[in-house]
Amino acid sequence: MVLETVRSSPHVVGASPARELLALAVGGLLLLASLGFALGLEVGLSLWWIAVTLGIAVAAGFAGAGLVPTVGSLWLVGWWWFAFPPLVGYITGNWAGSTRYNHPRMLGYGYESARAELIGGLEYSVRYGLLFAVLIGLVGYVVGMVSSRLTTRTSESR
C-alpha cells in the first residue's frame, strides 16, 4: 500500500523518460570527465562541479525526473569527485602526498599511501558526497519544479 503511494507520487520517483535521460546525461558527463582526467586534463576538483550539479538538479526538477533519481545521480557525481582521482592514482602508481590524485579535504591533512588515500576518498564520498547530493538535489529540484509549474501556468494563460 505504501509503495503504491510512493510510486504514484511524480516528484519522488519521477517520469520514466526524464529518469532515463537524467541517468544518461550524468553517465555521459562522468564518462567525459573520467576520460579527461585520465588524459591529464584539469577536470577534477573545482567549484564548477557545484554549478554543474546544481544545473543537473534544476533540469531534473524542470523535467520531472524525480527526487530520488536526482539525489542518486548527484551522489554519483559526488562519489566521482571524491573517489575517482585517488582510484586513478592508486591504479597508475602516480600517487604522491600532494597531487591531483588526492580527494578534496581540509588543508594540512593527508594520507601515507595511495591505498589509504583511496579508502579515505570512498569514506568522504559516502559521508560528504551523500550530504552534498541531498542538499544540492533538494534545492535544485525544487527550483526546477517551481520553474516548470510557472512556465506551464504562463503558457496556459495565454
Image (cartoon, rainbow, N blue to C red):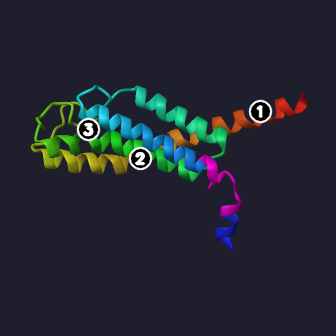
Label 2: which secondary element: helix
Left or right: residue 13 versus residue 97 is right
Identify residue type, mark 3. Answer: His
Residue indicated by mark 3: 103
- Nearer to us in this view, 131 or 28: 28
Precedes in sequence: disc 1 or disc 3: 3
Residue indicated by mark 2: 76
Precedes in sequence: disc 2 or disc 3: 2
Identify residue type, mark 2. Answer: Leu
Q: Position of residue 113 (x, y in %)?
A: 10, 44
Precedes in sequence: disc 2 or disc 1: 2
| Residues shaded magenta | 7-18
Q: Position of residue 13 (x, y in %)?
A: 62, 56
Residue 17 colored in magenta in the image: yes
Residue indicated by mark 1: 150
Specify few, some or many for label 3: CA neighbours under 10 Å numbering under 14, 14-19, or 20 or more.
many
